[in-house]
Image (spheres, rainbow, N blue to C red):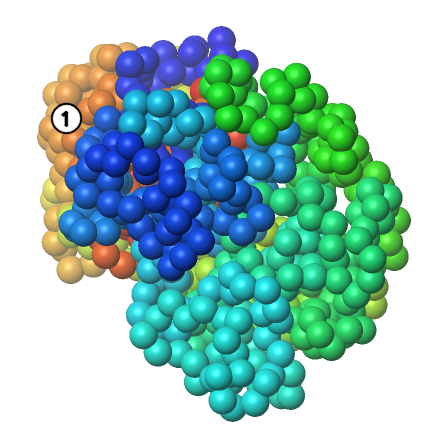
Amino acid sequence: MKKSVLLLLCVIGFQINTKLNAQTFYNINTIQKIEIQFSQSNWDYMMDTAKIGKDGYLVAQWVKVNGVQFDSAGVKYKGNSSYNAMNGKNPLHIELNYIKSQDYQGYKDIKLSNGFKDPSMVREALAYDIANKYMAAPMANYCQVYINGTYIGVYTNCEAVTKVFVNDRFYSKNNSFFFMDNFNCPLKYNGPDSASYTSYTIKSSTGWKNLINLCDTLNNKTSAIEKILDVDRTLWMMSFDNVLVNLDSYIGAPMHNYYAYQDNNSRFNPVIWDVNEAFGNFVNAGGGPALTLSGEQTMSPFIHLTDPNWPLIYKLLPDPMWKRMYAAHMRTIVNENFANGSYTTTAFSMQSVIDTAIQSDPNKFFTYAQFLSNVNNNVGTTAGLSVLMGPRVTYLNSVAELSAVPPTITSASAATTPSLSTPVTVTANVTNANSNGVYLGYRFALTQKFTRILMYDDGLHNDGVASDNIFGASFTMTASTAQYYVYAENNNAGMFEPQRAEHEFYTLRALQMAGVGQVYINEFLADNLNDAKDENLVNEDWIEFYNTTSIPLDLGGLFLSDDKLAPTKFAFPSNSVIQPNDYLIVWADEDVSTASYVHCNFKLATSGEQLILTNSTGAVLDSITFGPQITDKSLARCPDGTGSFTLAASTTFKATNCSVGVNELDKIASGLQVYPNPAMDYVIIKDGINKPQLLEMFNLIGETVYSGVLKGTAVINVKNFEAGIYIIRSGSSVKKIIINH
């Protein structure tokens, strides 16, 4: 695989800088280094005292994060059962801005877990790694901690759920915000007095009224719950907790370890927290005796379904659609992480990162041999991950609701690229679904909630012939972009497309007429003997156009000519769409255009002539006059669209004309930072725009491999991507990245 990747890099013209080492604070492939210096030699005693007392911070002389020094940071012990005054390694909470306004890569709070019940040291990081595929969840990796020059040991470094976190994920930070860190936070309604909700910790300046309304609606007016609770995110959280047997959570006896933040749509969003006892390390599910290993392996996916003490389960899952959605989410988590065994591969990869550090950890709770063993073997009463999850997957796949055959959804897409303010129809080929059980979810901004409408197979909704399994639904394209997904169900099971919806979705861009400064002649070949072939497998002259914008453009209504005295010689067919920051080829061969290929009614003169692109008013959008041409040598712009035409070393048919080094990419799109580049497991994307933007990643054949949100910083897990070159786009910024596993 690497050999083919290197060959591809040579073809594209990339220069790999192997010393490029940009990192992020939560890069799972590296261990962070945190050094703490206290002026007090009895710092441990003072922090124990603070923990037992008011749980206050001890001010450090300085804290260094990967060599960057922060003066007067606050440090304290944290944790419940993971803390013990006799431990040599207790969980830590470091607040960099305790006294001064300071942060590391935008992070002010650092929360470190000690792995006190986990011989494998991967449970927490692995659980968060899985969660991030399906919901807004903290990132996690590892760090080594030194205090007053002494190595304390290896910690799991977990992203704190703060205002910074909710602003990144939910695009606001000052709304109602609660932390369910104490025992017994089930969201039961205890009346209108906030004094009856003392187990809930408020993190915002106000919000008790909204929390009480959430509890009241959930328990007493469930039909209205979608107005004030993101039900889909809630179903994902409960699915995650159940599959991973994460009982130190809402679904277990404590009913805690989650946050709830109310976004600008007035809906509370759950965020998991403190998953260090996932994979069966906490055995009290509530409502009965502690679970044995066998009990964990066969724990019902619908535990507490009939118990009103867990109202998120008791009130939501009896709804037939929500229950089928919940089961669909469970099935996705099982299939993508456990049935295929990828979780153990990831676990071993994580262990390899910290192996040396674990060996030298003076305060580890288990031996190095136990560390190596626990992924696949029990260590004392701690089940091996595969010992737990292997039989659990077998059991879950035998449960009727998860083993039922769901609908099959293929070809979910818009029938045509829509124009702004016009109707657009999304169709999907759906089989094994109820006729009234196919839905389209859509929205026009990342900050909005999805609207869900029925899709029809009646021949009356742009869906083709009635009863042909093609379902259609329409909405008006009121914004330049829309996001959508399809959900289908039968009497027994449901299915999403994409399967990670609503966390992931498809993106649709409104089509606009190309204007001045938006599309350019980018490259042309006037004497094609051995270069690209058209759909008839003939070497013909070709002209490449480039869209400089972040929206799809329609060249229909524009004109192309090789004679300025006859500028309307060739009219582009309607719906000649050129995608954002992409290329369109016109074959100059006097053939007839087809639905998939554009052919113009003239050829290019090898002796030289001109090309001119105009609109219906006669305005010139772009033009070039050229002299004699060389066989199989093109003239091309670099940078694409805006550079001067030069003789290309080799043609770059429907690809970038610029052969640039990795370090030069930042100069081309300075508003977007992408690193590490080359990447192996994670890609970090940063920009300086203080509003959410659509973030997309494409492979070289134009397929969307990722679609999400960028506001400040985003992380894309690329572990399962094929090695190669990819395009990242956010707003008007575009970058290339190499993935080389």
Q: What residue lies at 59% left-to-right and 64% top-to-bottom?
A: 183
Residue 654 visible here: no
Q: What residue lies at 31% left-to-right and 50% top-to-bottom?
A: 57
Q: What residue lies at 32% left-to-right and 38% top-to-bottom?
A: 43
> Residue 92, image x and y in percent?
41, 42
- Nearer to me, 501 or 39: 39
Q: Which residue position is annotated with label 1?
A: 645
Question: On the rendered image, what quadrant is the N terminus found in?
Answer: top right
- Nearer to me, 94 or 478: 94
- Does residue 453 appear left or right of residue 684 in this picture? right
- Nearer to me, 269 or 112: 112
- Does residue 280 appear left or right of residue 622 in this picture? right
Classify 10 Å Cα crowding around label 1: few (below 14), some (14-19), many (20 and above): many
Vertical comparison of 13 with 155: above or below: above
> Residue 300, image x and y in percent?
82, 56
Vertical comparison of 429 with 130: above or below: below
Which amino acid lies under the numbered mark 1 shown in the image of this protein?
Answer: Phe
Locate residue 641: give its quadrant. Answer: top left
Q: What residue lies at 52% left-to-right and 44% top-to-bottom?
A: 83
> Residue 155, image x and y in percent?
46, 33
- Nearer to me, 580 or 501: 501
> Residue 174, image x and y in percent?
31, 70
Locate residue 727: give its quadrant. Answer: top left
- Does residue 322 appear left or right of residue 98 in this picture? right
Residue 137 visible here: yes
